[in-house]
Image (cartoon, rainbow, N blue to C red):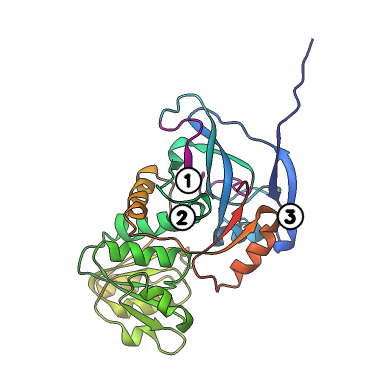
């Protein structure tokens, strides 16, 4: 005699076709189960990142047709663990970047991912702020520390310094003893000075390439002509790191001719790097700024806000909190 079981359902944001924010809808879907080496996390909050609306509109790194659920950043509580998991246990408060760049489905009440895509929540940090950290902080850490090896006394120029990645990168560079220079609109200058940015350049008033010199490391979070213009600010032997997928005209040749290194970094899930970020947070050397918190059902509104390109810090969806 065959037996059937009723699937356990959860709420999630899905879209059936690529398009504007209006394609996002709140639905009930089957709750995932953790496979070997995976954990099931009850999501309390989900971070919102530019890759989310890029995935919604044109697929991002997801090489499949909708329907699916976007999102990578989560913070919550481990509900269950799969075979072989020893680093985490049910009841642990965790945060992480699930499965990036493969589909993760973080805009949902539950998510599964390899256990080593998560770390325990920093002491004193709530789920909302923890959910704002993983993708942006890991991007900044892997760009500045793992790739550029920022050292004390170096001059670091960060474009879009008040944005999601930028405001965390500024603090990471400052914590490593660097002299940090940031580009931002005037309304965000005081915010950046409060994060340890030594010099702020108003990109709406001056060309940063005309006023900034002798830089050791440039972090580009903007794209367009910023990488090429940034070469003029670098000293010989310096490093230009972009987190924007490079176009065909990315200035690799010009960089080599100028005696500098130009590289593109795509962030990776890494529990060891997350633990480094946790230490910075617990030492109060790294503070994530959350500008807006919205309920899961308002994911479309969150995307609309993010796509304006004016957000200071991060936007977060509250799921179970």
Residue bounds of the magenta highlight: 87-107
The N terminus sits in image quarter:
top right
Whether residue 44 sits left or right of residue 21 in the image: it is left
Question: What secondary structure is found at the residue carrying circle 2?
Answer: loop
Q: Is residue 19 magenta?
A: no
Quarter of the rendering containing residue 230: bottom left
> How many labels, in total?
3
User: Which residue is depicted at the point 78% across and 13% down?
Assistant: 2
Of badges 1 and 3, nearer the viewer stands: 1
- Residue at mark 3: 17
x and y percentages locating residue 234 in the rendered image: 28, 75
| Circles 2 and 1 in contact, beta carbons < 8 Å | yes
Q: CA distance from mark 1 to mark 3?
A: 29 Å
Q: CA distance from mark 2 to mark 3?
A: 29 Å
Quarter of the rendering containing residue 136: bottom left
User: Which residue is depicted at the point 42% across and 74% down?
Assistant: 191
Residue 37 visible in the shown view: yes
State whether the magenta stretch is mostly helix, strand or loop. loop
Q: Looking at this rendering, what residue extends furthest in the right direction?
A: 1
Q: Considering only order in the chain, which callout, 3 or 2, is on the residue closer to the N terminus?
A: 3
x and y percentages locating residue 160 in the rendered image: 44, 73
Q: Which numbered circle lies on residue 133?
A: 2
- Residue at mark 1: 95
From the viewer's perspective, is residue 94 above or below residue 161?
above
Q: CA distance from mark 2 to mark 1?
A: 8 Å
């Amino acid at each position: 005699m065959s037996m059937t079981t009723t699937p356990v359902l959860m709420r999630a944001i899905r879209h059936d076709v690529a398009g504007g924010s209006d394609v996002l809808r709140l639905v009930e879907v089957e709750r995932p189960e953790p496979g070997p080496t995976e954990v099931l996390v009850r999501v309390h909050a989900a971070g919102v990142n530019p890759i989310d609306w890029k995935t919604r509109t044109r697929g991002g790194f997801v090489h499949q047709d909708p329907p699916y659920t976007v999102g990578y950043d989560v913070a919550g509580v481990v509900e269950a663990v799969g075979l072989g998991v020893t680093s985490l246990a049910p009841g642990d408060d965790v945060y992480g970047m699930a499965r990036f760049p493969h589909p993760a489905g973080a805009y949902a009440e539950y998510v599964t991912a390899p256990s080593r895509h998560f770390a325990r929540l920093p002491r004193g940090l709530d789920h909302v702020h923890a959910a704002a950290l993983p993708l942006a902080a890991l991007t900044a850490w892997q760009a500045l520390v793992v790739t550029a090896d920022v050292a004390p006394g170096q001059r670091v120029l960060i474009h879009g310094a008040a944005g999601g990645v930028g405001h965390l990168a500024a603090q990471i560079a400052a914590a490593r003893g660097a002299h940090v220079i940031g580009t931002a609109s005037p309304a965000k200058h005081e915010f950046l000075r409060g994060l340890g940015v030594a010099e702020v350049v108003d990109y709406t008033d001056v060309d940063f390439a005309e006023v900034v010199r002798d830089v050791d490391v440039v972090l580009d979070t903007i794209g367009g002509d910023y990488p090429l213009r940034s070469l003029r600010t670098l000293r010989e032997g310096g490093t230009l790191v972009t987190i924007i997928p490079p176009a065909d005209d990315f200035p690799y040749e010009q960089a080599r001719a100028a005696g500098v290194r130009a590289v593109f970094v795509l962030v990776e899930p890494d529990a060891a790097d997350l633990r480094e970020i946790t230490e910075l947070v617990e030492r109060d050397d790294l503070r994530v700024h959350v500008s807006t918190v919205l309920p899961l059902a308002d994911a479309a509104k969150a995307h609309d806000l993010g796509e304006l390109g004016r957000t200071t810090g991060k936007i977060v969806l509250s799921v179970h909190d």
